[in-house]
């Protein structure tokens, strides 16, 4: 067998020319989004006041297996793609495991995450349509940063509603977005009706992703030549992120490697959905496939403890309803949760695949264990991982340790979705020993479930 290098780089020409649309191959076609007023399946016409037309078409496209990546997006991809697939030789040595561990590193761009893959696509389609301004929300800040870069590149205005607690904790994230030309508003804010309502109900609210989404949608709906964009959860976002998995498969095929286990962290599901895409293709076609593990925090246990049903995508209940695993649109993880992945729902594509058994396992992990894994990984592999990505590292380490016990030489691939330079507050907490874990009680989760609409 060919010696496997530390990094498997692809040639620029090997960047996939098309995205892969998982839904075209899904046997159990997933349930359509519903209009919040009529409860009928949404049409492109329903979505058009909020989303760019081409993106609305992609969102509802259940039939085209491959979709061409337009030239200007492809050219932008060339600036930071193909992303490296790295063999974690040092981690393997540290763990003394017979497993081979690889990670696909998506943090080598200024946004520090995979989010740029979809941000540049969404900004491009907006520009093509003659849209002047985009609105969005951001939690930890990676999506807002990625979209600021994309809008800066194509000359679009951008307003970002940033979850207030996050804006306070991460002033430098805000500064980067502003450097790329975005306007950043802490949410809840007094610039929207829903924001004012939230503030009058709870003036000290630190905000939530669900509320920030409602604010961004409200502004997009009420401002001419303005549309709303979202960085995860949606079908079109998983489509754009399929580039991660397509590249991964191409890279491993050069060394005749087919993974046994593929692991990713799951917040709204976009990096995990992207990473598994090319291998899920095999599974959907009845071929051999890896064992897929989605990893989430115990404090936001969407797949492991959520309900699979129709729910709103935002707290203000202005967005369409999606059938997905959900903790209820009012769910907010406890205050001590530091590691991202805090959205109440999950990609409808991944939800359906998990429900139908195509995703083998969802696993929840405690944040102290996540940061222990992050610290170990940083020390031996050099890269400082994002707390989100570190959920995948935790599971990869645990799988590699199982191999050590059994002597199995499994090949494990995980997604290193981003870097953690702006998450040092959480690292400080961990390093000082003050980080705690929180397992929400059934009662606490019940509060979120009680807000799920009965259809
Ligand atoms: C946003 C983000 C995530 C979580 O979002 P998904 O849509 O689940 O991928 C994970 N890792 C990083 C680095 C992120 O920025």
Image (tube, helix red, strand yellow):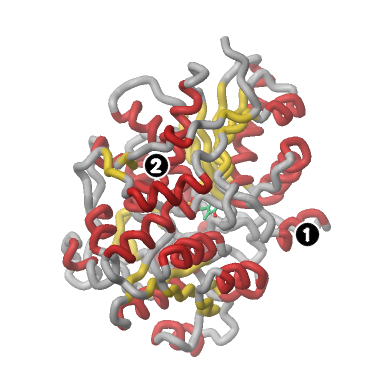
Task: Name above or below for residue 390 compared with residue 180.
Answer: above
Q: Position of residue 438 (x, y in %)?
A: 64, 57
Labelled disc at residue 351 = none
- Quarter placement of the N terminus: top right
Q: Is residue 446 visible?
A: no
Labelled disc at residue 428 = 1
> Which residue is depicted at the point 28% across and 44% down?
68
| Residue 402 in which image quadrant | top right
**Disc on the earlier residue, 1 or 2:** 2
Local packing at callout 1 (Cα closer than 10 Å; few below 14, some 14-19, many 20+) is: few
Q: Is mark 1 within 8 Å of ligand 1?
A: no
Task: Name above or below for residue 325 compared with residue 95.
Answer: below
Q: What element does badge 1 sit on?
A: helix
Task: Name above or below for residue 123 compared with residue 379.
Answer: below
> Which residue is depicted at the point 34% across and 75% down?
132
Q: Nearer the viewer, residue 14 or 171?
A: 14
Residue under label 2: 242
Answer left or right for 80 relative to 4. Answer: left
């Amino acid at each position: 067998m060919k010696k496997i290098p530390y990094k498997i780089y692809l040639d620029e020409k090997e960047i996939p020319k098309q995205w892969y649309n998982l839904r075209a191959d899904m046997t159990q076609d997933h349930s359509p989004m519903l209009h919040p007023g009529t409860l009928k399946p949404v049409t492109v016409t329903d979505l058009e006041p909020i989303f760019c037309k081409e993106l609305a078409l992609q969102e509802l496209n259940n039939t085209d297996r491959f979709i061409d990546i337009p030239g200007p997006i492809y050219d932008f991809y060339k600036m930071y793609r193909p992303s490296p697939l790295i063999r974690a030789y040092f981690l393997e040595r540290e763990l003394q495991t017979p497993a081979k561990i690889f990670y696909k590193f998506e943090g080598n761009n200024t946004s520090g995450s995979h989010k740029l893959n979809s941000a540049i696509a969404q900004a491009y389609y907006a520009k093509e349509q003659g849209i002047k301004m985009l609105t969005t929300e951001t939690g930890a800040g990676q999506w807002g940063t990625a979209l600021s870069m994309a809008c800066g590149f194509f000359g679009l205005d951008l307003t970002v509603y940033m979850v207030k607690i996050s804006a306070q904790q991460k002033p430098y994230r805000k500064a980067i977005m502003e450097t790329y030309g975005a306007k950043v508003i802490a949410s809840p804010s007094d610039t929207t009706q829903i924001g004012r309502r939230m503030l009058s109900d709870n003036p000290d609210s630190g905000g939530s992703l669900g509320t920030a989404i409602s604010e961004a949608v409200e502004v997009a709906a009420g401002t001419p030549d303005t549309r709303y964009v979202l960085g995860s959860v949606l079908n079109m976002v998983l489509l754009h992120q399929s580039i991660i998995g397509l590249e991964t498969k191409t890279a491993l095929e050069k060394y005749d490697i087919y993974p046994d286990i593929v692991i990713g962290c799951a917040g709204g599901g976009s990096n995990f959905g992207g990473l598994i895409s090319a291998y899920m293709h095999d599974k959907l076609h009845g071929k051999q496939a890896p064992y897929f593990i989605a990893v989430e925090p115990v404090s936001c246990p969407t797949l492991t403890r959520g309900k699979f049903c129709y729910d709103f995508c935002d707290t203000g209940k202005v967005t369409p309803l999606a059938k997905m695993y959900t903790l209820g649109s009012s769910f907010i993880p406890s205050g001590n949760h530091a590691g991202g992945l805090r959205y109440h729902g999950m990609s409808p594509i991944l939800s359906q695949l998990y429900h139908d058994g195509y995703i083998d396992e969802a696993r929840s992990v405690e944040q102290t264990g996540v940061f222990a894994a992050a610290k170990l990984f940083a020390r031996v592999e050099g890269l400082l991982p994002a707390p989100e990505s570190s959920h995948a590292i935790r599971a990869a380490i645990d799988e590699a340790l199982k191999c050590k016990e059994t002597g199995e030489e499994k090949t494990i691939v995980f997604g290193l979705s981003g870097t953690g330079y702006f998450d040092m507050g959480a690292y400080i907490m961990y390093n000082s020993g003050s980080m705690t874990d929180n397992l929400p009680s059934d009662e606490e989760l019940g509060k979120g479930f009680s807000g799920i609409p009965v259809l």
